Amino acid sequence: MRILIVEDEPLLRTQLADALHAAGYAVDAASNGVDAHHLGDCGSYDAVVLDLGLPQLDGISVLRRWRAAGRSMPVLILTARDGWHERVSGIDAGADDYLGKPFHMEELLARLRALIRRAGGHASAELVCGPLTLDTRNSRASVNGQALTLTSHEYRVLAYLMHHRDEVISRSDLVEHIYAQDFDRDSNTVEVFIARLRKKLPPGLIKTVRGLGYRLTAAE
């Protein structure tokens, strides 16, 4: 899963990026509204953390432009504790949730997990597909209760497939959602990650749809 952080304060931006990396996400970051608008308009993100007080172009304007262009990724806005008018403006502009500064990182992570789950139509923090369970709170996967050992990229591939269970996901979609913008992307490595996952999962969970991509579904 891939997240965009938009925050002009360097220390907080770094702290957010580190926390999201540790939680298993691919992360891009922007320090101003112009760069943020470009990234959100061109990239594929599962969620965005958006500060409103940005240089060059304010966060509300960035959000409005995204929504006007049909960009529907979930957006969590960051506001000052007493900035209730900013929260109202953000929600009206198309934000999905807000969090006041200062905040606890665990709360931000929980809100992001909830936004991503809701975007995929999931109600629980645990995603299940047959014997396979993904605990999004702890970034852990298990089969019949036995924990799986996964690399960071294997986990990202599996998490994206689990959030889109029973959907056909193309290789290009997986590339867009498991790598950060500045990562040296190679679409062929997706096949490697899929092959590794198949060795760790029960047969038949990840199906190849010829010419289209992959589908995660409970074995028939």
Image (spheres, rainbow, N blue to C red):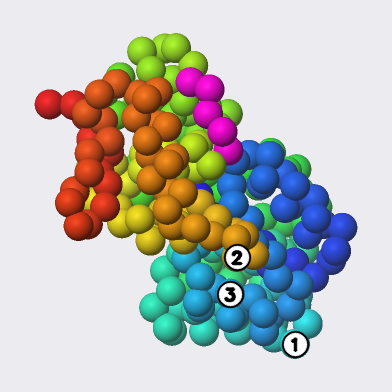
- Mark 1 vs mark 3: in front: 3
Amino acid type, residue under disc 3 in the picture: Leu
Residue with the mark numbered 1:
56
Which SS class for mark 2? loop
Q: Are marks 1 and 3 in contact (CB under 8 Å)?
A: no
In space, the residues marked 1 and 3 are separated at their CA atoms by 15 Å
Q: Quadrant of residue 123?
A: top left
Which SS class for mark 1? loop
Residue beneath the point at 47% across and 25% down: 141
Please state the horizontal and vertical placement of residue 71, each as a whole percent of the image: 43, 74
Q: Give the numbered dot on residue 3.
A: none
Q: Are marks 3 and 2 in contact (CB under 8 Å)?
A: yes
Amino acid type, residue under disc 2 in the picture: Gln
Circle 2 Cα neighbour tier, 10 Å, few/some/many (<14 / 14–19 / ≥20): some
Span of residues in magenta = 148-152
1 or 3: tag closer to the N-terminus:
3
**Which residue lies most toward the left here?**
220
Residue with the mark numbered 2:
181
- Mark 3 vs mark 2: in front: 2
